[in-house]
Amino acid sequence: MFNKVKHIILSVLFVSTLFVSTFQTTVFAAEGETISVVGNNNELLLDETNYTFAEDTTAFDVLVQAVGESQIEYTEGEFGVFITGINGLKATDPYYWAFYVNGVQAQVGADSYVVQEGDEISFRYTDWTKPSENSVSLQIVGNKDHVILPEPSSIAFIDQPTAFDLLKIGYGQENIEYETSEYGVMITSIGGLAAEGTYYWAFYVNDEMASVGVDSYKLQKADKVTLKYESWETPAGEPTEEEQQPEEEQQPVEKFDQAALNNAINAASQYVLKQEVGDWQAVALKKAGKTLPASYLANLKKQLTERQGSFSKITDYERLTLGALAAGEDPTNIEGYNLVQAIYNGNVTKQGLNGVAYALIALDSANFEVPSSAKWTREALVNELLKNQNDDGGWTWSGEATSDSDTTAMVLTALAPYVESNADVKSAVDEAVKYLSAQYKNSKIDNSSTAAQVVIALSALSIDSHSSLFSKDGVSLIDFLLSYQNNDGGFDWQGGDTSDSFTTDQGYRGIVAYQLFLNGKGSLYSLNLEKKNTETPADNNETPVVVKDDVDKDTSENISTTKNDQPEKTKGYPLPNTATQSYNMALIGLALLIIGITSLYVRKRQQQ
């Protein structure tokens, strides 16, 4: 009888264990992932300890897991979580809790950094009045010496991280693409600027070309690390912008072929709809009079729900506001969240002038009401842009003295609605248009993405991109943009026959904006709030969401629809402990209860 009872109990336990195991939270093996906490005078509060993590686990989650939530003191504000104490050691001025990833001081908050495989995390009690003895600078220089990442004052490091660690943590690993081979790491893209053709990402240390790869160089005190976009065919002694003067006499611009533009838009629409449709593409599709796949709106709402309406980047709110409008939704109340309020009360300067410009664009897209008590009124946003204009007439997102065409175009798009009513805006815009004209005539606008941004801005200002003002050797700016469209309808960045989604996104917006200009339909980002279509679709499987617009819908073609973008992985406020076992413990308790009942039943049978 005893063996029978034992077999019954073991069987129930085995089945219960299998049942419980199916509810386990998926975690990643902790092979190289460690966390440590170092207090005042290098006192070790937590020795290097392995941790487990799941998708979207943040550094703050890992800290909670390692020391316990009761041992952490923190406050929450508009910038996220600010740690005020660990294990009773409070961060009182001038001390704060800094955290390092793989030996490099993180440039975002602990609740915004999403843990990656192999990450070694360390929280350090730091005196901000005493700069770290071990610090380096990081600079990223893009095409035509355009500074992608300005040189910061310093980035502290501990132990012996590599220049690759510095690049990933200093600029954000989500902005970097690379390949790994037996020879080490090769950078293939930074900030969307791909190493292709004759161009590559050169690695310099203290202004000298490094003799080893970026993943092999160990950082040294006071190093100046530079990643520079270069071509081995770039001729030395290229004339500077000052030496190149706009041509006095322009060849006449041929009459623009509007039929060819319509064909280009239809072909680009086909390309976009065969890819995963994102928020920017949704705006262009709407303004081109096309239809959006139903999955776009479904996934937009899913993204808002999963993130609980909370995003770490102001540009996420701005982009999603425009995307919601394109899908016929009200961004002031979508899934219970007010994206517009998050913009005018948000930290719009955190991402440079890019965040400021698109804040104004988003607020004006459907003429949203902004209360006078808002942190950022329209007047404040306009003034912020005006005060940052450079002497050359342009703007740069980082506040550097040397302007760039992309940022200048984005700012002009934002200021366009205020030209007629604000003399200061008109004066600033006139100077900026001259700057962009010189840039194009001096061949400084040399890729499709920049050309598209300028076309969008000029179209919003009712300036023709097919005029002598924006023409060089008889080729207008819009013709230049269209020259990058390939046979598949997509665009490439700087020549070639291979299209990519990122470049096509901008090129497509550019040609749609120009069509709106030709038809007198205003800015690309002018999107009105409209009533939803409440009719039940006949086919619930990928039925398009029809959105109205102020242009005639093109019914001459049947464009197939595809599945939309998966929700973007964004960093936000801390999530609950991803390694929680509350459900598992409840199920284990249930299993033990079953075992107890079985044992009791067997004993009663024995007593009978």
Image (cartoon, rainbow, N blue to C red):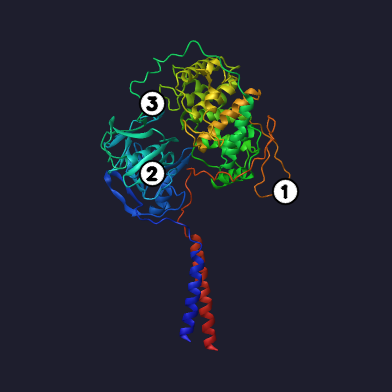
Q: Nearer the viewer, residue 359 or 534?
A: 534
On screen, 510 above or below 586?
A: above
| Spatial separation of the CA atoms under disc 3 and disc 1 | 54 Å
Identify which residue is drawn at 43% across, 52% down. 69
Q: Position of residue 275 (x, y in %)?
A: 56, 42
Q: Which mark is residue 538?
A: 1
Q: Give the crowd class for mark 1: few <14, some 14-19, many >=20 residues within 10 Å.
A: few
Identify which residue is drawn at 70% across, 40% down. 532
Q: Tell me which amino acid carries mark 1.
A: Ala
Asked if the residues shown at circle 3 and circle 2 are in contact, with their CB atoms under 8 angstroms apart, the answer is no
| Spatial separation of the CA atoms under disc 3 and disc 2 | 24 Å
The answer to which of marks 2 and 1 sits earlier in the sequence is 2
Q: Nearer the viewer, residue 161 or 422?
A: 161
The answer to which of marks 3 and 2 sits earlier in the sequence is 3
Number of marks in the image?
Answer: 3
| Residue behind mark 3 | 145
Q: Tell me which amino acid carries mark 2.
A: Glu
Q: Give the crowd class for mark 3: few <14, some 14-19, many >=20 residues within 10 Å.
A: few
| Spatial separation of the CA atoms under disc 2 and disc 1 | 46 Å
Q: Position of residue 387 (x, y in %)?
A: 47, 20
Q: Give the crowd class for mark 2: few <14, some 14-19, many >=20 residues within 10 Å.
A: few
Q: Tell me which amino acid carries mark 3.
A: Asp
| Residue behind mark 2 | 179
Q: Nearer the viewer, residue 512 or 305?
A: 512
Mark 1, secondary structure of its residue: loop
Name the front one of labels 3 and 2: 2
On screen, 12 above or below 275?
A: below
Q: Position of residue 141 (x, y in %)?
A: 38, 30
Q: Is residue 178 left or right of residue 465?
A: left
